Amino acid sequence: MTTEPAAVLAEGDALDLLQRGRLEIEGRLVDASNTTLRAEITLDGLTRRCVYKPVQGERPLWDFPDGTLAGREVSAYLVSRATGWDLVPPTILRDGPMGSGALQLWIDEPATAESLIGFVPAWDVPEGWLPVANARDEDGEAYALAHADDQRLARLAVFDAVINNADRKGGHVLYPATGAIHGVDHGVSFHVENKLRTVLWGWTGKQLIPEATEVLTALLARLDGELGEALEEHLTLTEVQCVRKRARRLLRAGRFPQPPEDWPAIPWPPV
């Protein structure tokens, strides 16, 4: 058996590994609110790590009574794949040691990886960063929650608006050595009501990145075909219809959305 954690798997190979590989649980990620397990998965001598979120370990949420969080994780991957932006690691729904659950390829971050989101001194926001909110520490020092004005983060902000992500924390953004950016933890997405909560409000009201027009147009076409049918396996018909509505609204407005007025705009904790 060979283990190659640093090598990049092609998407098709990763999906095949997740679907057919033998799963061995390594341990639980204790910071997660729902049962989240790290596991090794092996197929034909190839081993990778993955995250396994069994449905039976989900804590019921009053405002997400339909479907499963695992199904929403898979749905986020399906939408990400349709955009062509590679924002969500390969994710499937399959049986495991604790029953059916979401299985997602583990993303390694190098020790030198630097976050593009965080709290910085209010008087020293880095050049090229966008302030989102003001804060003070326990000593009264002023800080700003901010993020980089980065094309990869802007793509993620568009994606989050489409799936109505209610929990885009800074810690839910990963920075692999490939230079890509990945978003994880999408279990509280796709609600029919506006519940967008994110740390990526730096572009509020600004024009969408130029490539968003083409991507959203193509996404809408796919939502009327195979993508819509695939999402209906995990979401309600109304939730899928709302994905279409949000994509159309973004395309028509041509601007990043405004924070909600009747829902906390920033998740807690933010990072």
Image (cartoon, helix red, strand yellow):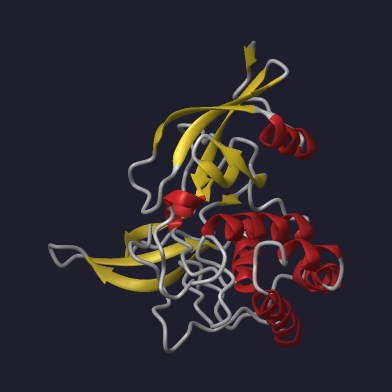
Q: Residue at x 43, y 55 (%)?
A: 58
Q: Nearer the viewer, residue 270 or 49?
A: 49
- Location of residue 133 with respect to 92 vertically, above or below: below
> How many labels, in total?
0
- Residue projecting furthest to the top: 1
Q: Residue 204: percent from the left, percent from the top?
A: 55, 79
| Residue 105 shows in the view | no
* Residue located at (43% from left, 70% from top): 131
Q: Quadrant of the C terminus?
A: bottom left
* Residue appearing at x 41%, y 47% in the figure: 35
The percent position of residue 97, horizontal first and vertical second, equals 51, 34
Position of 236 with respect to 142 (left or right) is: right
Residue plotted at (51% across, 54% down): 185
Q: Quadrant of residue 154?
A: bottom right
Find residue 116 and report its horizontal and vertical position in percent.
49, 53
Residue situated in front as seen by the camera: 217 or 68: 68
Return the x and y of residue 75 as percentages of the image width and height. Answer: 66, 60
Question: Relative to the observer, which residue lies in front, 155 or 267?
Answer: 267
Which quadrant of the rendered structure holds the N terminus?
Answer: top right
The answer to whether residue 134 shows anywhere in this view is: yes
Above or below — where is 235 with respect to 99?
below
Tell me: 210 left or right of 178: right
